[in-house]
Image: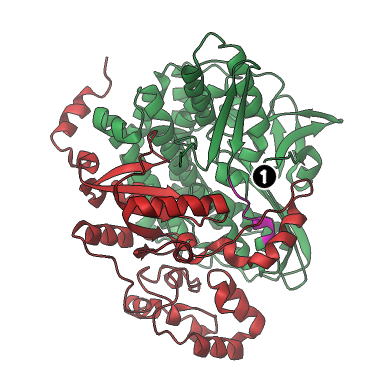
Amino acid sequence: MDPFSAWRKSLMKNLTFLEMFKERKKLAIVDFTDCEGCQTEFFNVASDINSIISKFDIVSWRMTQDLSKLNDLDICLIEGTPITSYDRERAKNIRSKSSLVGSLGSCADLGGIIAILKDGERKKAFNKIYSKNKPFYRQVKPLSEIIKVDFKIPGCPIRPTYLKEALAQLLIDKLPQPKPYSVCMECKLKGNDCLLNKGIPCLGPITNGGCKAICPFNNQPCLGCFGIMEGAQVEKLKQRLIEMVGKQKTDDIFRIFLNNYI
Amino acid sequence: MKDYFIKRVEGHGSLKIDLNKGTARILVEEDERLFEQLIINFPYYRAPFITARICGICPTAHYLASIKAIEAAFDIKPNKTVIKFRKALLAAQIVQSHTLHLFFLVLPDYLKTRSVKEMANKYPTEFNLGLNLKNVSDKLVKTLGGREVHPLTPKVGGQEKAPSLGKITSLIEEIDSVIDEANDTYKLFNQLELPEIQQSERAYLSLDSNNYPLYQGEIITGLAGEKFKTSNYKKSIVETEREGTLVKLSQYVEKKKSKPIMVGALARLNKSSNQLENNASKLLNSSKLSLPSFNPFDNILAQAIEINHYLETAKNKLNSINKNELENLTTKVKPKKGEGVGAVEAPRGVLYHYYRTDNKGNIVKADIITPTASFMISLEEDADLLIRSNRDRSQAELELLIEQLIRAYDPCLTCSVH
């Protein structure tokens, strides 16, 4: 007996989500060192039944399928940062098989949360955690310093609406562009209380928008996970923050996603 | 370049089966991220934010364990409404993770499909069932935690942006709208023919309190009388390093004898089935699961039952919140020198965060033990057992069988190397 027969029938009328897997633009999702939180946002976007994902043909995605065909790709989204020489080679190989490569999330875009430790600090940190294993040579850097990256879907984690928008653009052969405004702007539009005005250090003024100021909306400062906006006055904000809360707290807030700017 | 990673598990791993020796080696191919050092010298309030990023599937569990550890170090007791919110949030996180695991990682194997893509085409009902449940658990986590992945609003000592009573009511309606789906999920997984092996000598551990294991409790107990305080976990859970893997493998140690650990849905259910919520309890009674079960494949069915249980828990917690409770949910935090352990039930089992703070409240020492690192030895032993008891099968069949075992455990290889 099929316990779902009635439901199956009603669903068959309305199976738009099946389009998700028709022969369309070939999309691959590949991950390196990270938490895999950004790729789970695809399930979030997919739960929208007329989902934009349905317009793509997902040919490779380790989290969902057995077969991996990383050939003749139209688009490859790379999540995580390749920190070993082996992974860097894998990244280069994937680049050569895909017309477009995009970074998915802050790890690929900026180096991500693990870039809190600079390369020179990793060995010492490793030895504090492990005694038997020997530290390896690892380099944590943005994907764009390893291979050419055509576009980015930033954030830690990425935002579902941003992902949908980016996919819609890719569908009509347009490259997703960074928003031409800062988190600060989105925060004002939302009518949030300014954290800086309350004396809480926040990177909203220099960070690329697109997150709809989700952190400040929840009374948490912006930590810059969308990356620095083009033309942002980083030094000016930094000076202002140092005057406000001192160097230590200013460094702390930059260290999480924008360690290179300390 | 060949992509040889095991498919449909969280994180990167590979499998090597040696038919002659009768062994299976599961290699965790994750690179170290050094989280226990990443957070050193950061102020306490950044620890939950940073450590949540250990895992994108169960960030809420890490976030809450981190908060719990800091509150223990500072001797803070948040008010009871905050605890209700945290329990509802963690319950929703477990439903979110179990759903992802059961429908998109486990189910394709049993429907004899090779991928989610194929499953979606051949079994749209099941696929959509999973999406619906995922959708609602995402909404719960988003409303209660501020974001569907990597929460924002729970904080040390309290809760930012608590949802309004109207939002709470609509969340309860959302839960009600998928109760049938949760029930169907149970039916679906109860009719699967799961492989069978019998484990022996395991420590089935979970958090002990008056309720089914979730957030509260400072003691860990096991099926065979194992018992220790979470604040003393380092004496009972002993980590060892093995060359060639960056996972610190844990074992339960009592009187100098060590046992492999089982944590997660089956371990919780084995010990605490009498504490299940009403509906889930009824489902358990009608299921083919007989407890205690020592078959790791039963973890799959245990998760399906838990989806029903935790949805009900989340609903009950939300239902118990009154309008007048929703104000003043944050307390002033006085940082101090101290140390504390926060242990919670992550979807895959008990998760420990330990921190030591200096007098300004900066993190000076940290230790984290994840469920996957806890059950890795158990998984390895079961894989060998499975090979030995299925010698007549071909290499390809064995590979699939071992992969099914791995998926039944629901390992988070990313978490295991953190």
Q: Classify residue A77 by image quadrant.
A: bottom left
Q: Where is residue B311 in the image (x, y as percent from the top left)?
A: 43, 40
The chain painted red is A
Q: Where is residue B379 in the image (x, y as percent from the top left)?
A: 62, 28
Number of dots carrying numbers: 1
Q: Where is residue A198 in the image (x, y as percent from the top left)?
A: 51, 84
Residue ID at (16%, 27%): A9
Q: Chain B is shown in which shade? A: green
Most frequent secondary structure within the magenta stretch:
loop
On screen, B108 above or below B42? above
Residue ID at (31%, 30%): B119
The answer to which of B39 and B45 lies nearer the viewer is: B39
Q: In which quarter of the image is the N terminus of chain B?
A: top left
Specify the segment rendered in magenta.
B30-37
Q: Classify residue A230 by image quadrant.
A: bottom left
Q: Is residue B166 magenta?
A: no
On screen, B25 above or below A258? above
The answer to which of B417 and A16 lies nearer the viewer is: B417
Q: Position of residue B147 (x, y in %)?
A: 43, 58
Q: Mark 1 points at which residue?
A: B246
Which amino acid does the dot numbered 1 rest on?
Answer: Leu
* A126 left or right, relative to A5: right
Residue ID at (46%, 37%): B98
On screen, A248 above or below B396? below
